[in-house]
Amino acid sequence: MLEGVFFCALVPELRSRLEGRTVRKVGVVIRHGLTLVFPGGALFLCARPDRPGIWFSSESHEMTEPDSPAWADHLEGAVVRNVRQQGADRVIMLEMESADPYSPGGVRLVFEATGRNANLLLVRSSDQRVLAVTRRVDRERSRYRTLVPGSSYRPPPPSGLSPGEWCGGGEGGLSLPPSPGESDIYRQLEGVGPCTARAVLREAESSGRSPMDVLCGLEEKLLRGEFRPWSGPDGPLPVPLGPGEPLEDPLAPADDRVQQTVRRGTLEDYLRSIRREEAALRRRLDNLEQARSEMTGPEEYRHWGELLLANAHQVEKGRAGVVLDDWEGGRTRIPLSRSRDAVSNAQRYFRKARRCAREKESLQRSRRSARKRLAELEQMASEATELDSRELERRLARRRKRRRRGRSQGPPEYPLSGGWRCFVGRSAKENDRVTFGLGRRGDIWLHARGLAGAHVLVKREGRGDNPSSRTLMQAASIAANHSRGSGSSIVPVDYTEVQHVRRMKGGGPGQVTYTGEKTLYPDLSDPGTRCFLERIGDA
């Protein structure tokens, strides 16, 4: 674990390598981190709570885009003007000046390597506003400060006496017991942790000096900038203290730290991607199994059709169902389509009987395909731990590329409560594809009433149950948010089954008429609705 006094030795190294240099590219190599590519190398800032760190390496790695576009917008093309540290603490700030003449003022990249509170922030220099952050800190997490985009940046509180106050004497200086332990030292001094405290005690024991004398000597070297980076048995130090050896390049990925950290992060991302696909496949298998178990057999469909034809004179059009006497002396309940008469309903059931075998085989094929893919994913996950970093990066890049290609080639898909999902058309052609390409009988279709907007389709996927009111309201809020009424508070949204939607005669793509609709009234100003839209990335 890097400590603040070692950061004191890193600042001059960073200044010599970065000041006056232009950031060429910004990306993410290490999860919870940021990578800034400069001419001649890249700066790795890792804000992982378990192992924060900072390195400079000329080796290239596969990078992904940061979560917020603000990182690239403000940092790419910016010039590093200054590198400084907050006291002797584990906080380093890179003062950046934008090369864009239309973006006056600068930004500050703040790296807080403070253990479990490690963070990376992009702060506007003019008013200290946070523009982007890797780990959001709200009032529930911290009563001392809030770190979210738009908040005012407040640095971490001092962790103890800063260099210059250690050995100055008086009541405010360092006070040690006759036989101090390491905690007696690092709990009082800023930038000093267990690693440095142990090194001070070892140096005092081997040299015959008191721990206070060793600390005063360390303080003097820190104030004068007389750094000689040292690799001790417990970690890096700014000057030689106790056993160890010189650290020639304190910013180098010593002990292959970058490779290990990159590989660990890449492996986690790769396995997370596999688990996400596995979860989706298992949900699909559950739906297919439910559809198979609830599937009506062809004999029953034919029986319903024959009963309807025999009793057509008793069945009135517009009814949702009818109970008829069968030929064995029992009574059979038959669901009906309200828009059809008895003969049309009978013909529909005869068609269903003919299609039953095909539908059953289709379900079986889908189940076999999903199970085969699950077995492939399990094999990929078991092999992942044996792959080297480069191969992991290649495989993860292929999975991400395939996922992006899937998104770019089709309408976006959003998860809803209860395991349901919906598709959203973002243009007239996509609306047409959602409704008439992806839509199947029984799927729920939604559209903002009387407003231009997206067609939203809730897929049934063979499920025998109906979406809950909560699920429908979530889909309605998506439809409202993708309509001309998105700036309003309450937007009426019509919904009906997709088979009741027809293309408008003479109309263009996405222009439809529909019947049998009901209306929902989602409130886009409701905090719960906004939270749902933000969670699925649709706000």
Image (spheres, helix red, strand yellow):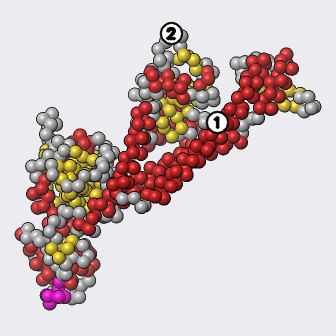
Q: Which residues are magenta?
A: 203-209
Please say whether residue 205 is visible from this viewpoint: yes
x%, y% of residue 475? Answer: 52, 34
Q: Residue furthest left?
A: 224
From the viewer's perspective, is residue 429 above or below residue 296? above
Q: Residue at x 17, y 46 (%)?
A: 23
In the image, residue 206 lies in the stretch drawn in magenta: yes
From the viewer's perspective, is residue 499 above or below residue 539? above
On residue 362, the disc is 1
Q: Quadrant of residue 313?
A: top right
Q: Quadrant of residue 16?
A: bottom left
Looking at the magenta stretch, what is its main secondary structure? helix
- The amino acid marked with disc number 2 is Gly
Q: Residue at x 25, y 52 (%)?
A: 60
Which quadrant would the N terminus be assigned to in this image?
bottom left
- The amino acid marked with disc number 1 is Ser
Within 10 Å of disc 1 (Cα), the crowding (few <14, some 14-19, many 20+) is few
x%, y% of residue 473? Answer: 54, 34
x%, y% of residue 283? Answer: 58, 45
- The residue labelled by disc 2 is 506
From the viewer's perspective, is residue 396 above or below residue 239? above
> Left of 314 or right of it: where is 440?
left
